Image: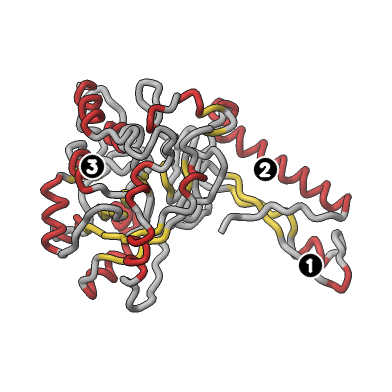
Amino acid sequence: MADIVRDTGKKCSNWGKWGAEDELGTLNYITPEMIARATRLVKRGVVFSLAIPLDNTGPQVNQPRRFNPIHRMILTGPDFTTGAVKRPGGVGFADDMVIMALQCATQWDALSHCFLDGKLYNGYDANLVGSEGAKKNGIEKMARHIVARGALLDIARVKGVQWLEPGYAITVDDLEAAMRAQPVAVGTGDALLVRTGQMAMCRARGGWGDYAGGDAPGLSFQTAEWLHAKQVAALATDTWGMEVRPNEIPNTYQPLHQILIPHMGMLVGEIFDLDALAADCAQDRVWEFLFVAPPLPITGATKRNSQTRSRPAGRRHLERSVGEWRERTAATARRFHRRLRRRNTFGVVRRGP
């Protein structure tokens, strides 16, 4: 059955389409003219954040390498009010740090995240993604490019349900039915958002459950050629892994990823919170919008949230248990804090925008 994946990959390949040195993939479909047109979609000036909070209540439960953010303070109010740290004129500052797996929350998969048969998008060697990050197809290459017309397909709402059940495969027929029912067009250079309602299900049930890595609704493998033909620039869903789980093709893992990322060069987004946006779109029946979601430009990262996420590869991190990693990082933060107090100096570790 793996031949289906490779055969489909060949049909959908964009290798060389934008040159032998390309590292942007389908983001090349977005032109300055398209961005200018997308800005004209703004009528009311209402803004929706599609990112989930970066805290310890996130969905990464019982994940061996991905864990929810650990937030630690480096400078605090008591550091100054107790006199442990002093600055002229009574001024004080707070500084903090976040330790996290860059797949922990709302994220973009960089084109270095997935490879097949040892090859990244555009034919780059997978060995270029080493312990210090990705030398090719890193997420930082995309930081200036994710501004586009967005189109939301609310599959759950079109089907008249609060959420699609885990294991439901969204087909091409489902996507086109939603385009007709809402209605909204999807075409070249668009950022396509697909809502399954899985986050709404988690909210209704009072917890994440097995949202991370468990059975889930998602796009069917058969949508690969449709997405390729539509020349979509980016695809994002409200699920952990974008595609239907369990996967449809036996003896494969995330087969749609294998087409979209290393063959097509498509930016894939996961864990996007689409509920509030979908409710607003349903109210005024306008399903297109200006979509702005740049990743943090972490050099060599293989992932990154559209407000907080990306993933540097590192064997040391993968080989440690999450518990040991948390203990060591917390201890490091405590030692750093003590040094700051002794030296009476600032240690600046800033969170990204």
Q: Is residue 21 above or below residue 178?
A: above
What amino acid type is highlighted by mark number 2? Ala
The quarter of the picture where residue 225 lies is: top left
Tell which circle, 2 or 3, labels the residue nearer the N-terminal end: 3
Pointer 2 residue: 330
Under tag 2, what secondary structure? helix
Question: If the image is split into quadrants, where does the N terminus sit?
Answer: top left
Q: Indicate left or right for 92 with 250 as reference.
A: right
Q: Residue furthest front?
A: 19
Q: Is residue 7 above or below residue 201?
A: above
Question: Is 131 or 9 nearer to us in this picture?
Answer: 9
Pointer 3 residue: 228
Instruction: Name the residue: 43% across, 27% down.
Output: 124
Instruction: Name the residue: 88% across, 69% down.
Output: 88
Under tag 1, what secondary structure? loop
Mark 2 Cα shell of 10 Å, populated few (<14), some (14-19), many (≥20):
some
Question: Is 24 or 42 nearer to us in this picture?
Answer: 24
Residue 144, percent across and down? 48, 54
Mark 3 Cα shell of 10 Å, populated few (<14), some (14-19), many (≥20):
many
Evaluate if marks 1 and 2 touch, with contact meaning CB atoms under 8 Å apart. no
Mark 1 Cα shell of 10 Å, populated few (<14), some (14-19), many (≥20):
some
From this viewpoint, is residue 210 visible?
no
What amino acid type is highlighted by mark number 3? His
Foreground tag (2 vs 3): 3
Residue 171, percent across and down? 15, 44
Q: Is residue 343 above or below residue 331?
A: below
The quarter of the picture where residue 265 lies is: top left
Question: If the image is split into quadrants, where does the C terminus sit?
Answer: bottom right
Pointer 1 residue: 92
